[in-house]
Amino acid sequence: MDRPSPLVERDGPVLHLILNNPERLNSLGFEQHEGLYDALRAGEDDDEVRVIVLSGAGRAFCAGDDIKPHGADGWPDRLKHRRVPLDVGVGPILLNDVTSAFRNCLKPTVALMHGYAVGAGYDYASSCDFRLSTRGCRIGDPRIKLGLWGCEGWSYKLPRLVGQTWVAPLTFTGDLITGEQAEEIGFVHRLFDDDAAPREAAAAFLHALARLDAGAYRAKKADLLLGLDQAYDHVVRSLA
């Protein structure tokens, strides 16, 4: 089944990447993952883009990977050597690539969550610098209930975002939490009402980010990523 590529829209210095498979709550296939990767890279290379925002069309941010069977014939030739023995979805191949690209992007990245942000959608959100959500959005990783697992770095990211106390209930039970609960544990930075249009509700926040000094943001984020990946004493010496 063909899945529409993400929509790419500009609001001045803010680049919106909008998942565009609303009939399936923006579940992700090759076209969506690859479209996001290409649009993200183009935004990184465009000096007029100051903020990159990921959101979803319709009733949800993202309901995860499309887990309908994809036979070997459905895989792009360039990725067939990386195929894993799964009968459902695209597995971790593109998800790893694109979530890593979001995490390592040195421009501000923002996820606007509404409806559902689960599975791969949750992975994308946790790879962004900022997460804004409707109060009632359902957030989490239910893959364990399907006998599946997250492979794109949750065990690295989640303890750093919310602390180990919340790792078990968010990961091992597969239960979802609301946007309000996610704000309480520090996963979500700001909330808006359930009936709000996410991109409109977030506009002031996004344009405030766009006014930050781009060079300073880039340097600070590079320092943050360096600090997360290395021992404290090494980081302190490298920044002295």
Image: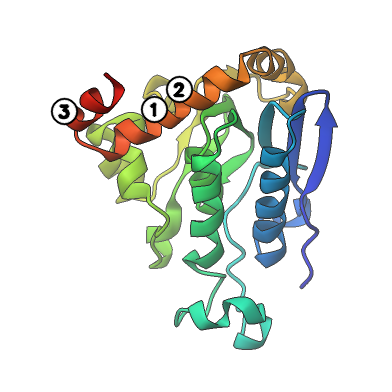
> Does dot 3 land on a helix, a strand or a loop?
helix
Query: What label does residue 223 carry, if any?
Result: 1
Q: Is residue 100 left or right of residue 173?
A: right
- Residue 186 at x, y percent in the picture: 40, 23
Q: Is residue 72 above or below residue 19?
A: below
> Does dot 1 land on a helix, a strand or a loop?
helix
In the image as oriented, which residue stretches furthest toward the left?
Answer: 233
Q: How is the image coloured?
A: rainbow
Q: Is residue 129 above or below residue 94?
A: above
Q: Earlier in the sequence, mark 3 or mark 2?
A: 2
Query: What label does residue 84 carry, if any?
Result: none
Q: Residue at x 70, y 40 (%)?
A: 45
- Residue 30 at x, y percent in the picture: 66, 66
Q: Residue at x 58, y 68 (%)?
A: 67
- Using a 10 Å C-alpha cutoff, classify the residue at mark 2 as few (fewer than 14 neighbours), some (14 to 19) or many (20 or more): few
The amino acid on which the numbered mark 3 sits, given as a three-letter code, is: Asp
Location of the N terminus by quadrant is: bottom right
Q: Nearer the viewer, residue 155 or 62?
A: 155
Q: Earlier in the sequence, mark 3 or mark 1?
A: 1
The amino acid on which the numbered mark 2 sits, given as a three-letter code, is: Lys
Query: What label does residue 220 carry, if any?
Result: 2
Question: Whole-Å distance between the Cαs marked 3 and 2?
Answer: 18 Å
The amino acid on which the numbered mark 1 sits, given as a three-letter code, is: Asp
Q: Is residue 152 above or below residue 136?
A: below
Location of the C terminus by quadrant is: top left
- Residue 34 at x, y percent in the picture: 67, 60
Q: Residue at x 23, y 35 (%)?
A: 164
Q: Which residue is mark 3?
A: 233
Q: Nearer the viewer, residue 86 or 144?
A: 86
